[in-house]
Image (cartoon, rainbow, N blue to C red):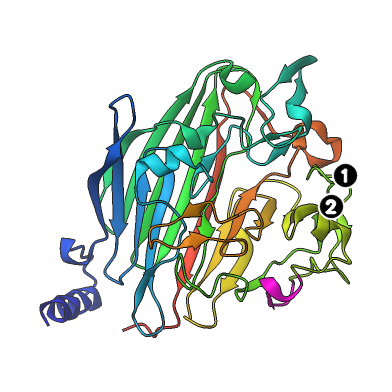
Amino acid sequence: MERNRIKMLVGALAALGCMVWTPALAAQAKRSTFGKLPDGRAVPAVTLSNARGVSATVIAYGASLQSVIMPDRAGKRADVALGYARIDEYLSTPQYFGGTVGRFANRIAKGRFVLDGKPYQTPVNNGPNALHGGTVGFDKVLWEVVDVKSGPTASVTLRYISPDGDQGYPGTMTVDATYSLDEANALTIEYRATTDRPTIANITNHAYWNLSGEGSANGAMGTIVTIPAERYTPTDSGAIPTGVLAPVAGTVFDFRKPRAIGERVRDARDEQIVFGRGYDHNWVIGRSVTPSQHLMARAYDPASGRGFELWSTQPGLQFYSGNFLDGTSSGKAGKIYREGDAFVMEPQIFPDTPNQSGFGSARLDPGQTYRNVMTYRLTNGQRAK
């Protein structure tokens, strides 16, 4: 009742042309601790929440999105992001759950690239290739919490300084990850990076989504997905792009009209599905990074009414259907995560860009700022009150 009176007062003042901000209607950011690492360092956590029942918890280990809680169309809240309840699980069974991945997200063929005529070798950790920055990528280090804010938009900014030669990459890179949540249910993740030597950069977030609720028996294969892309990048058997930008028309990769993930994810007639054990491919949304965001994808769970639109500044969308969730991990609800229990949508530049002349550039020079901004516009089918 009191909250409604406050809203009425704010509305009346606004009608008179007054600009009003009140803490009672502000999104909140609250600090806590998510356990300790074996060396005794505490792992900070920050929970962002708004008045519409949405919250997001970020932990400093891996600058990871540990939890996203949102109501369904009936107002029932559930955690829709896969993750662990304890820090020791992130250490013992790493799965990239909600992690910040870099310096180079996705794959680099044989872990090798050449920059200014000099060859570099990064650790191979995905068959013969490098994945998500190497064996100790950004998802496996402790970040520093440098700023926490409540207000019309609640936010937390974390920072990691990757030293020159880290995982074989040149240059000292300073990376900021800012998570923010507003009262319109927009959850934004912004990555910025600078370097003191020429290097390469491709940083994104690896959130696993199950809009029915993490650990739900429904899994995620009934999720309806739309991806506004006319082309995708086929791969070899090791998930390295062939360099071709292939049309999605007439293939199982055509999500220009809404389709359930599970509708064609097991179609063994498509060699690409066999290679990836499902979807684990890059969709071509554009050909270069843009200053402003554009639509990358939509996802909707018919059972709960929960969904989101994903917007980003990046040209590529890596869409992964949870093919390698193998029952070795159990999540916050105490349920085992199985194949197809979640999906991942990662805005980024194309995989293996440093080795693919037709894919543009992954280069970051001193004086430049790398930037990847992605926003999940969360929805739940409820009418605004």
Q: Which residues are magenta?
A: 256-264
Q: Quadrant of the N terminus?
A: bottom left
On whether residue 350 falls in the magenta region, the answer is no
- Picture quadrant of residue 183: bottom left
SS at circle 1: loop
Separation of disc 2 and disc 1 at Cα? 6 Å
Locate residue 367 relative to residue 72 in the image: left or right: right
Residue name at image x 87 percent, y 63 percent: 270
Q: Earlier in the sequence, mark 2 or mark 1?
A: 2
> Which residue is labeled 2 in the image?
234
User: Does residue 111 sit above or below 326 in this rendering?
Assistant: above
Q: Amino acid at mark 2?
A: Pro
Q: Nearer the viewer, residue 308 or 371?
A: 308
Q: Amino acid at mark 1?
A: Thr
On whether residue 263 falls in the magenta region, the answer is yes
Q: Nearer the viewer, residue 384 or 135?
A: 135
**Crowding near the residue tagged with mark 2, few <14, some 14–19, many ≥20 C-alpha atoms within 10 Å:** many
> Which residue is labeled 1 in the image?
242
User: Does residue 283 sit above or below 366 in this rendering?
Assistant: below
In percent of width and height, residue 157 lies at: 37, 41
Residue name at image x 73 percent, y 42 percent: 351
In percent of width and height, residue 41 lies at: 29, 28
Residue name at image x 61 percent, y 32 percent: 133
Residue name at image x 74 percent, y 60 percent: 278
The residue at the far left in this view is: 2
